């Protein structure tokens, strides 16, 4: 059915169904990402409680809690999570890089992080978040020096 006054096609049940499926898919990805961030934060605070002097890389996080989503270019939230923690001062760049052990990272370099001042969120009612996922290490070789700052 043709649209009115340049509005294009307003009615197309097939297109409406396609958009409904697309919207539900986006919502599920958003829920998966939120669930991943909750798990990532729980891992982070548990790691801090276990050893506040430990250093870690993104491989350690993803080995412990998995990747947030499926497919290429759907996991940018991992880097965004680290950036947000760094901006809040919860983590500090240790001025070194390590090679990733994840196959799809192709031995790419990852920043080594150490704890800054974690700001554990408080659940309404006063209790702090502290589930106990087990941290794992995907650490490989390490790079230091001036080249490590990139």
Image: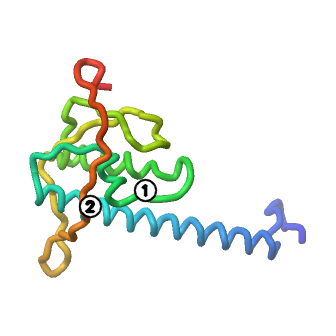
* Residue 64 x, y percent position in the rendering: 32, 58
Splitting the image into 4 quarters, where does residue 11 fall? bottom right
In x, y percent, where is residue 40?
A: 30, 59
Q: Is residue 145 above or below residue 81?
A: above
Which quadrant of the rendered structure holds the C terminus? top left
Q: Residue at image x 32%, y 46%?
A: 138
Could you say which is closer to the camera, residue 73 or residue 52?
Answer: 52
Name the secondary structure under disc 1.
loop
Residue 16 picture quarter: bottom right
Q: Residue at x 48, y 65 (%)?
A: 30
Residue 124 in picture, x, y percent from top left: 19, 78
- What residue lies at 38% left-to-right and 68% top-to-bottom? 35
> Can residue 83 be seen?
no
Q: Which residue corresponds to mark 1?
A: 67
Relative height, residue 133 to residue 75 (above, below): below
Please identify, in this view, whether the residue under mark 2 or under mark 1 is nearer the observer: 1
Q: Which residue is mark 2?
A: 41
Q: Earlier in the sequence, mark 2 or mark 1?
A: 2
Expressed as whole percent of the image width and height from the top left, the position of residue 65 reads: 35, 60
User: From the viewer's perspective, is 141 left or right of 88?
Assistant: right
Mark 1: few, some, or many residues within 10 Å (few <14, many ≥20)? many
According to the image, what is the colour scheme of the structure?
rainbow
């Amino acid at each position: 059915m043709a649209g009115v006054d340049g509005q294009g096609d307003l009615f197309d049940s097939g297109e409406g169904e396609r958009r409904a499926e697309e919207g539900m898919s986006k919502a599920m990805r958003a829920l998966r990402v939120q669930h991943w961030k909750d798990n990532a934060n729980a891992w982070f605070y548990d790691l801090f409680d276990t050893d506040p002097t430990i250093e870690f890389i993104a491989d350690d996080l993803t080995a412990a809690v998995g990747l947030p989503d499926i497919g290429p270019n759907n996991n940018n939230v991992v880097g965004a999570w680290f950036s947000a923690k760094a901006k809040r001062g919860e983590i500090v760049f240790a001025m070194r890089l390590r090679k990733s052990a994840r196959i799809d990272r192709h031995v790419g370099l990852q920043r080594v992080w150490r704890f800054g001042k974690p700001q554990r969120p408080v659940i309404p009612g006063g209790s702090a978040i502290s589930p106990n996922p087990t941290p794992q290490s995907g650490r490989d070789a390490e790079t230091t020096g001036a080249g490590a700052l990139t």
